[in-house]
Image: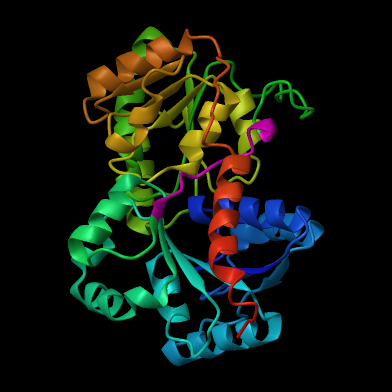
Amino acid sequence: MRILQLVHAPRLSGAEVLVKGLAMYHQRAGHEVCMTSLLPQQEDFVDIRAELNAAGVICRFPEVRHGRVGKLLHLYRVVRQFRPDFIIAHATLAALYVRLLPVHTPIAWVMHSGVNDFENGALKRAERLLSRRARAIIGVSQQNIDDYMREIGKHPSMVVIPNGVDASLFAEDSHAPAPDSAVPPKQIVQVGRYIEAKSQLHTVRAFERVLKAEPEARLMFCGVVEDLDYHRAVVSLVKQLGLESKISVCGPRSDVAAVLRSSRVFAMPSRFEAQSIGFLEALASGIPVVANRIPSFGFANNFAGVSLVDTADAEAYGHALVNALKTPRAHRQLAGYTLHDTADRYMSIARKFAQPMQISA
């Protein structure tokens, strides 16, 4: 089968990391896969593109930032040239654009957002017009499906497919090199974009309390700087508290597995998430996890070494981080949340709708 994976922008973010895993898994299973986008590739995607190319996945990203018509023309050219049997569009804008094309290829669109995109009136109206152009609506969480049904209505084919990760890449017994000896022995790490919803400021305030009990602790942030003002606010708070020697505010990292292996605690104070890839990667690594008490993290509440707290409460958050520093790593069974599980469920959707068509655009 020929599968086209469409994203909004090739960048180092959860949805794109999932797409990379799906594309490589399906390519290695004997299918032909192409990945394309509405926007040009960002610099932090270079390593991921190299992995895709090495696996035989075709990448067709625009070289420049197009306007609306240009985006449609780019997508149309990719579809005509690759001739997919099935298109999987990730995120709202990508799904809207591809369903405007005059093609007959069956399309599934995947809702990744942790917020209700259809609170935007223009997006809601567009989706109501284009809803049936998608053969399947996929949510990475039940909340996605609930939002869709409330705002748009029922669709003939709606399904929840949780995100999955390749657990073997994050296991302690992997063949990756040992942690760098320069890494602080009590390092807490938070991985995620610098935006208000990721709540790095909460982690800084909680970490100030951690140092009272664990003066040797260190904190590292890694992530794409998406909101420049918010990133500046994080740096400013670190300086204001005099913690520049204790906290590293870093950019994106493509070696997340190595970072998790060399750290002692993973912090995830997000205000909302749909179904976080970063959270799943941390669970797969066995690292103790302290995360916000939100519905999308609830499935992990009974896992060893996982603490869900109100991360807006600096005292409670800090106390949980201190306890996590004393907690050993755990072996967690992620049944239903592995890349194998997720990729197989996507393929079952593709087979359901692509086989009867037997033709592409």
Q: Residue at x 73, y 21 (%)?
A: 173
The quadrant of the image that shows the C terminus is: bottom right
Residue 264 locus on image (x, y percent): 54, 19
Q: Quadrant of residue 48?
A: bottom right
Was residue 236 drawn as part of the magenta stretch in this picture?
Answer: no
- Horizontal side, residue 183 vs residue 131: left or right: right
In the rendered view, tell whether residue 183 sits above or below residue 37. above
Residue located at (77% from left, 62% from top): 53
- Left-right relation of 333 to 146: right
Which sits in the foreground, 249 or 203?
203
Q: Is residue 166 magenta?
A: yes
The quadrant of the image that shows the N terminus is bottom right
Observer-nearest of 246 and 165: 165
Q: Is residue 264 left or right of residue 311?
A: right
Q: Tell me, yes or no, if residue 44 can be seen here.
A: yes
Where does the magenta region start and end? 159-169
User: x, y percentage for residue 318?
Assistant: 32, 19
> Above or below — where is 333 with respect to 113?
above
Residue 19 coordinates in the image, percent (x, y): 58, 56
Q: Is residue 356 above or below residue 139?
A: below
* Residue visible at 55% across and 79% down in the picture: 105
Q: Nearer the viewer, residue 157 or 140?
A: 157
Taking the spot 54% from the left edge, 28% from the top edge, the residue there is 334
Question: Number of callouts in the render?
Answer: 0
What's the colour scheme? rainbow
